[in-house]
Image (cartoon, rainbow, N blue to C red):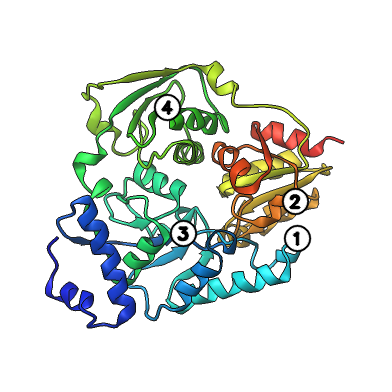
Amino acid sequence: MYLTPEEEKIINGGRGATYQKAMEILTALGDIYGADRLIPIRSAQIAGVSYKTIGEAGLEWISDLKGKVAVPSILNPAGMDMECWQEMGIDRAFAQKQGEIIRAYESLGVRTECTCTPYHISDNLAGFGDHLAWSESSAVSYANSVIGARTNREGGPSALSAALIGKTANYGFHLDDNRVPTVLIKVEGKLRDSDYGALGYIAGEMVGDRVPYFKLESTPSKDELKYLGAAMAASGAVALYHVEGVTPESGKYKNWVPDESITIEEKQMKDVYSSGEPDLIAFGCPHSSVPELEKLAQLLDGKTVKRETWICTSRFVRDKNPELVRRIEKSGAKVFCDTCMVVSPASERFSCMMVNSGKAHKYVPNLCGVKSIMGSTEACIEAALRE
């Protein structure tokens, strides 16, 4: 892989050990995947934030780094609400370690808004055609598919390395040839809301890491595209998809002839849904947007939840919408920031969680050790209100 004189200087230790290690990680990935060079990135989104997932070894690794990121960089969700952790049921020892992780990233110049939806916070992190180094699977899917930016699904260390250098290796979804769809998916029936998460749950299992092109009978909103991509990234490894007439790159492939075609029937999606008696109802995987908070506020107005109910969102969205938060919390539901039900140990004390997210439905049993059932947003609220 070609390196500029400045890049050669960095990999030889000319800017210190932290930048040298970062360059070694980037060039190793480039060599593995056949990259020709490093390319500048607009932003980085860094996973490996929750103490639940990275533990003491991760904290030690981050704390040893000395330097500053070269591009705007933001964190993935942490293991707790950084302000209301006691309300979540987090113990003090965990909170202390989580705080150390956040401070270590902050010392590197990383923005400490902990969210899987950085596109809700700022339009300056990603635009059409921009090269990025993002690591959270649903954020990667959204950036590639809905925004039309270009990023691979980075690991936490590689995203942080790219943030420090301001570049990433030129391979994978940074290249035109790898953004071409590889399988057609025809979807029967009109979809709405969490149906897109159910579709993604099924489609991801079917296509793995391929690039699907969807023909739908309905037109999804941006939040519905978020549900679709998040679920496919969880049940499979889809990092880029196209929706005919909706996503920004779909028009390139109007005359594309697929080698394989799959049909998904409405019944298959309905079969993802199930009923039960949850002791936690959780929304916000990925983090809830303003329209999602508006819908939840409307459904909860004048009502009182009878079961533990969480809504997870970014602190930016929460702080910008105090009246929506007030209406939601008046019902007894709790709005948490910086974290989600998947990466926080707080959810592990429950026995059954109900979600409206295909991604959470896939991850909760394995990562939290909790039974998961999935329903529409309305069904989840009905369960929350039930005695």
Q: Mark 1 and mark 3 in contact? Answer it, CB < 8 Å.
A: no
Dot 3 amino acid type: Ala
**Which residue appears at 34% of the width and 58% of the height?**
133
User: Of label 3 and label 4, which has the lower sequence position?
Assistant: 3
Establish if 162 lies above or below 311.
below
Tell me if 315 is positioned left or right of 385 in this view.
Answer: left
Spatial separation of the CA atoms under disc 3 and disc 2: 24 Å
User: Of label 2 and label 4, which has the lower sequence position?
Assistant: 4
Horizontal and vertical percent position of residue 303: 82, 42
Furthest residue in direction front, as rendered: 57
Q: Nearer the viewer, residue 107 or 369?
A: 369
Spatial separation of the CA atoms under disc 2 and disc 4: 32 Å
Q: Nearer the viewer, residue 74 or 157?
A: 157
Q: Residues within 10 Å of mark 2 (few under 14, many from 20)?
A: few
Q: Mark 2 and mark 1 in contact? Answer it, CB < 8 Å.
A: yes
Tell me the residue that label 2 is attached to: 349
Spatial separation of the CA atoms under disc 1 and disc 3: 23 Å
Q: Which mark is residue 89?
A: 1
Q: Residues within 10 Å of mark 1 (few under 14, many from 20)?
A: few
Furthest residue in direction right, as rendered: 387
Tell me the residue that label 3 is attached to: 47
Establish if 63 lies above or below 356.
below
**Which residue appears at 76% of the width and 62% of the height?**
87
Horizontal and vertical percent position of residue 124: 38, 61
**Which residue appears at 26% of the width and 32% of the height?**
251
Q: Mark 3 and mark 4 in contact? Answer it, CB < 8 Å.
A: no
User: What kind of element bears circle 4?
Assistant: helix
Spatial separation of the CA atoms under disc 4 and disc 1: 38 Å
Tell me the residue that label 4 is attached to: 206
Q: Mark 2 and mark 4 in contact? Answer it, CB < 8 Å.
A: no
